[in-house]
Image: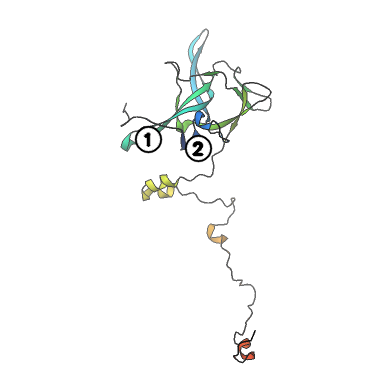
Amino acid sequence: CIKPVRDNQSRSSDTINGHIFHTKSYDEGRSVQCSGVTLVAQTSSKSAGNNNPMVENKTYYGAITEILELDYKHKGNIALFKCEWVDNRVQDKWIKVDKLGTTNVNLKHLFNTGSKLSDEPFILASQAVQVYYVEDPSDNGWSAVIETKPRDFYDMAKVQTESSDHESEHVQCPDFGGSNITPDQTYVSPVRSDIDGIIVNATEKRKKNNGKRKRK
């Protein structure tokens, strides 16, 4: 295991995969919520009377409490999210799906917050899917989970640091709606070629005035 070349850098905001992520404390008092995350992970468990471990997918919902960046010098940087997670150890207790298919979570019942040595609060930032929580005014502590979509984001700073051999990987072409129109075909000439032009004699007015200026 290779250690980072220097101490971890902690920050309150970072941009990953077109999403802007904030820590929970940084979100406080802001109109935009960017600290909610979800993650699907494989877990293994044993049932009574069966010693063979069962592998299943479990969905985790939580909020970012800290953003860390590990610097491995020429090997690159790795961003980590430290999160507090809604308790999902008992199915359909603090994470429920209603009749309309909306996932609801109780943010007052958390675990893996990092307060215990056995907790595992860290995830790779690249694994996180951003969500935001809409509080249910009729049910204290419960919130609906809404998954966000990345904005039309283009990180120019990262492109400039890449070599020219990889520039084509960062170019985002405009979407023309799946038609056969190419960018060159969208140009419209300011001169019409489908009708005859009108010829104007520029010297006609000068002859009528006999070269004299009109007095005011």
> Residue 47, image x and y in percent?
52, 11
Q: Which residue is mark 1?
A: 77
| Quarter holding residue 133 | top right
Q: Nearer the viewer, residue 99 or 206?
A: 206
Q: Nearer the viewer, mark 1 or mark 2?
A: 2
Q: Position of residue 210 (x, y in %)?
A: 61, 92
Quadrant of the rendered image containing residue 142 = top right
Tell me which amino acid carries mark 1.
Answer: Asn
Q: Quadrant of the C terminus?
A: bottom right
Q: Amino acid at mark 2?
A: Ile
Numbered disc 2: secondary structure: strand
Q: Is residue 106 above or below residue 11?
A: above
Q: Callout 1 environment at 10 Å: few (<14), some (14 to 19), or many (20+)? A: few
From the top left corner, tell me how far across and down residue 58 is, in percent: 53, 22
The residue at which mark 2 appears reads as 20
Quarter of the image with the N terminus is top left
Does residue 175 lie above or below 128 as drawn?
below
Q: CA distance from mark 1 to mark 2?
A: 18 Å
Q: Position of residue 29 (x, y in %)?
A: 56, 32
Residue at image point 48% right, 25% down: 83
Graded by Cα atoms within 10 Å as few (under 14), some (14 to 19) or many (20 or more), the crowding at tag 2 reads some
